Image: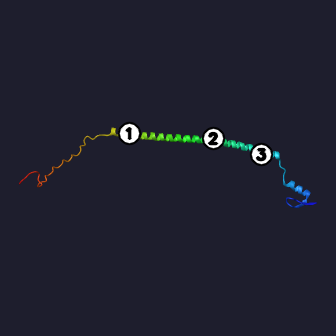
């Protein structure tokens, strides 16, 4: 007896159709799939919990990083202030040493200052004598 398969429309004997169906579709082991599903979901939950804890840790570390950056800036500012102050004191000390090591040359005499010339009178171009 030959019949047509409703799915593939191939004419086969009824026994052959059943044989093809069971050969092509393997039997599913439902308890095994359930166990595997439970295992995968538990792994997923563990990973999610780990991700949450890492996010929390990351937030804490970010806050610490911000605090350390602020502290670093404060230290840099105070270091710059101290450095400027130390430079200032070093310059003052150098000036003091220069003044202490300074010698005055007592043999030095300033050049004579020129004396102002007497002005001639405007009359006749003489020095104030009237000859006439």
**Local SS, label 2:** helix
* Mark 3 Cα shell of 10 Å, populated few (<14), some (14-19), many (≥20): few
Point out the residue furthest to the right here. Answer: 1
| Residue with the mark numbered 1 | 92
In depth, the one of 105 and 59 nearer the eye is: 59
| Tag nearer the camera, 2 or 1 | 2
Residue at the spot x=81%, y=45% of the render? 32
Q: Which part of the image, by quadrant, shows the N terminus?
A: bottom right
Q: Distance between the residues labelled 3 and 1?
A: 81 Å
Residue 35: quarter of image: top right
**Local SS, label 3:** helix
| Residue with the mark numbered 2 | 57
Residue 101, compared with residue 28, is above or below; it is: above
Residue 15, compared with residue 105, is above or below; it is: below
Of the image marks 3 and 1, the number of the one nearer the N terminus: 3
Q: Residue 108: percent from the left, percent from the top?
A: 25, 43
Point out the residue furthest to the left here. Answer: 132
| Residue with the mark numbered 3 | 37
């Amino acid at each position: 007896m030959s019949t047509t398969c409703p799915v593939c429309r191939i004419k086969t004997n009824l026994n052959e159709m059943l044989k093809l169906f069971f050969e092509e579709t393997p039997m599913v082991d439902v308890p095994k799939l359930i166990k595997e599903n439970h295992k995968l979901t538990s792994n997923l939950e563990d990973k999610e919990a780990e991700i949450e804890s890492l996010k929390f840790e990351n937030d804490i570390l970010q806050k610490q990083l911000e605090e350390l950056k602020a502290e670093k800036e404060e230290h840099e500012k105070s270091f710059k202030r101290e450095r400027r102050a130390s430079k200032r004191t070093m310059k003052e000390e150098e000036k003091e040493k220069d003044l202490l090591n300074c010698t005055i040359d007592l043999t030095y005499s300033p050049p004579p200052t020129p004396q102002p010339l007497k002005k001639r009178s405007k009359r006749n171009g003489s020095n104030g004598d009237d000859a006439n």
